[in-house]
């Protein structure tokens, strides 16, 4: 499967998984000049900015997480919050959802401390 489509499929699986965990998806594939945020969700007054990594196995997913990428997501989140000032009163968090072949998604919360 083409990498682009595998990424979109992984994001869709991650979104469905988060919905089952009680999250409300408020935006997908939010693009800015700073970068893209795969999923923006909310649960219990916490706005969660989610990076999705889809690879053949979990180790490859972990290895695909880059500090520079997380910084871009943090910068893009500030643009999103400025455009949605009603969400600024909420707590914010940065999570990662790892999608690997034949496994349940792995949701890692608060990766800013990763």
Image (cartoon, rainbow, N blue to C red):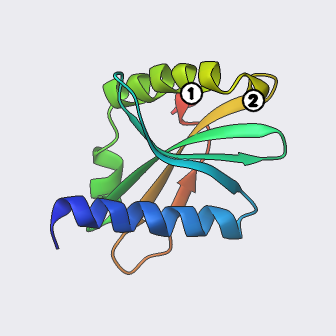
Front position in the image: 24 or 112: 24
Q: In this view, does 79 lie to the left or right of 70?
A: right
Q: In this view, does 96 lie to the left or right of 25?
A: left
Q: What residue do we see at 82% from left, 23% from top? A: 89
User: Which is more N-terminal, label 2 or label 1?
Assistant: 1
Coordinates of residue 54 in the picture (x, y in percent): 33, 60
Secondary structure state at the residue bearing disc 2: helix
Q: Quadrant of residue 81?
A: top right
Relative to 101, is 58 above or below?
above
- Image quarter hosting the N terminus: bottom left
Q: How far apart are marks 1 and 2 (CA)?
A: 9 Å
Callout 2: 10 Å neighbours few (<14), some, many (20+)?
some
Coordinates of residue 6 in the picture (x, y in percent): 27, 66
Q: In which quarter of the image is residue 69?
A: top left
Q: Are marks 1 and 2 in contact (CB under 8 Å)?
A: yes
Front position in the image: 63 or 30: 30
Q: Is residue 1 left or right of residue 7?
A: left
Q: Name the residue under label 1.
A: 80
Q: Mark 2 points at which residue?
A: 87
Q: What residue do we see at 32% from left, 24% from top? A: 68
């Amino acid at each position: 499967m083409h990498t682009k489509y595998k990424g979109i499929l992984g994001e869709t699986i991650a979104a469905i998984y988060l919905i089952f965990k009680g999250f409300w998806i408020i935006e997908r594939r939010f693009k800015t000049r700073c970068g893209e945020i795969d999923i923006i969700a909310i649960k219990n007054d916490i706005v969660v900015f989610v990076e999705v990594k889809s690879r053949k196995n979990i180790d490859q997913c972990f290895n695909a997480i880059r500090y520079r990428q997380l910084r871009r997501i943090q910068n893009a989140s500030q643009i999103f919050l400025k455009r949605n000032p009603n969400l600024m009163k909420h707590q914010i968090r940065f999570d990662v959802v790892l999608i690997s072949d034949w496994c349940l998604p792995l949701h890692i919360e608060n990766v800013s401390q990763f």
